[in-house]
Amino acid sequence: MPRVSRALISVTDKSGLEDFARTLVEKYRVEILSTGGTARLLREKGIPVTEVAEFTGAPEILDGRVKTLHPKIHGGILARRDLPEHERQMREHGIRPIDLVVVNLYRFEETVASPDVTFEQAIENIDIGGPAMVRAAAKNHAFVGVVTAPAQYARVLSEMERNGGDLSATFRRELALSAYRATARYDAAISAWLARQAGEGDFPVALPIWLDRALELRYGENPHQEAALYKQGATGIANAEVLGGKELSYNNLLDLDAAWGCAWEFERPTVVIVKHNNPCGVGSAETLAEAWEKALAGDRVSAFGGVVAMNRPLDVETAERLARPDQFLEALVVPALVDEARKVVTTKPKWGKNLRLLRVGRPSPAEASRRPFALRSISGGILVQTEDASLYDPAKLTVATTQPSDAQMRDLLFAWKVAKHVKSNAIVLAKDEAVVGVGAGQMSRLDSSLIAVRKAGDRARGSVLASDAFFPFPDALEAALDAGVAAAIQPGGSMRDDEVIDLARRRGVPLVLTGVRHFRH
């Protein structure tokens, strides 16, 4: 069986390299070729290494831009060992085979993430020789192994141990797949950055997207659908730490993201309860425990089996209230929690052992500004939009009728934040920083208003209303006012705005216009 006799190692990430290279040399008698800093490190560690320039007979030139771009390197990688003509040409040109290529690329993404990076610095951090070698080795994986990450070192050595110093054909193919993924991701990052430099704006001519599979799910929205979670970046629900409970489902993740996004709209301690991607209970208060009681009171029936998000660390008092025997929660996401609180929610209620408990922090402003596009697939393509990150424009916030009281304005803005996260047509009724009724996803805004009023019951009296889009007719607002709603907030902009404003004026209720719509389809 052939074995790995010569390896070319040139890496930016040098973690684990010393032990890996030493094992190659001392156990398997592999000759190591290397360049620049990698060669210096190996030499300092007492590991024999041959400089690429010595191997090729050609010096590094152009400030190191040309080091490995040489026939003796690429010929050694790309030559087919099963073709006599290739072997003849290798002898004729003094080319020796390279059996293992260990390369990871310049840190381009880290470089351009720095706010101080110059265009010239970014360009110099575009790797040329590395991707060329990786692609060459991946193409010729029938004979050559290619390693693109330190995490693969242990597996490579294990394979060599199992195969008498060689790598199996199946493993070389697996490495080749990883290699092409690495170069595809690298090229996607570079093209995205260059598109921004070229002024193509938020929507470049081509949209390179790279997502890493984080989790295969049992199924999708329904058992007959297959599903998986892919992630981009390092924040958000996709990167949450799962602390326990049953396996996460597709629907769990959708609801967790909806709850988490709504919870972080608020500065005060806030609890959000979501059912089928809509908030059914939201409460803000001085303490998290009080916020939970407010959220739960919003719709106790719908809250059963709900998904909960909090914008403060879970404390023991709140945990005790969540764990009451008459309640049941599917999932809970918090930014942090104390050990005793975790113990309460996971052991005290009967369902505690199954509670999907996640921990994920609020993203920093810098991370939030780099949040990926919102994507939606349609037949034959993908719709792309920026995130709905603007709540309202303070300059456009106007009072169209009588001035609301301070308490009413507080509740109007509270309800407006919630309405942003409710499926359109969205009507939210709130009082004392707590949701008392929600109408979501109806084809008619009037129907949404009637549902919200019915959900609220007597609590509608004295509450405020938020509508995610303008009232096309006065009827939806009138239905809410008839139930006792005392103030309303909406974007405005309807052809019948005058009729809607006139209704509010005649009924003596404040009507606030935001000038911003929050459709959520």
Image: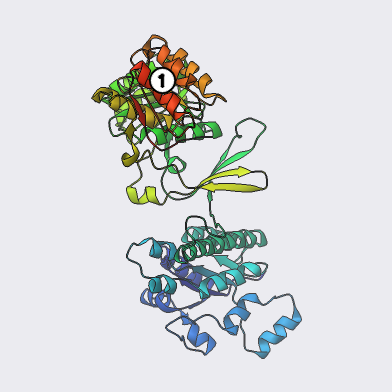
Residue 258, x across and y down, in percent:
46, 33
List x then y, in percent, for residue 504.
38, 21
Left or right: 88, with 383 as reference point = right
In the image, taking residue 56 as reference, residue 397 lies left or right, namely left
Q: Residues within 10 Å of mark 1 (few under 14, many from 20)?
A: some
The answer to whether residue 110 is seen in the rendering is yes
Tell me which amino acid carries mark 1.
Answer: Leu
The picture quadrant where one finds residue 414 is: top left
The secondary structure type at the circle numbered 1 is helix
**Residue found at the far right of this picture:** 84
State which quarter of the image contains the N terminus. Answer: bottom right
**Residue identified by numbered label 1:** 503
Of residues 313 and 506, which is closer to you in this image? 506
| Quarter residue 418 falls in | top left
Figure colour scheme: rainbow
Near-viewer residue (332 or 138): 332
Examine the rendering and report whether any part of residue 323 can be seen: no
Above or below: residue 516 compared with residue 289: below
**Is 305 above or below relative to 171?**
above
Is residue 119 depicted above or below 178 in this figure?
below
Quadrant of the frame with the C terminus: top right
- In front here: 221 or 422? 422
Q: Which residue is drawn at 70% across and 76% down?
A: 81
Query: Front-most of 369 and 313?
Result: 369
Q: Left or right? Give the position of 152 relative to 139.
A: left
- Image coordinates of residue 520 in percent, x first then y, are 50, 35
Where is residue 99, by image quadrant? bottom right
Name above or below for residue 517 compared with residue 147: above
Query: Where's residue 505, x and y in %?
Result: 36, 21
Total of numbered circles in the picture?
1
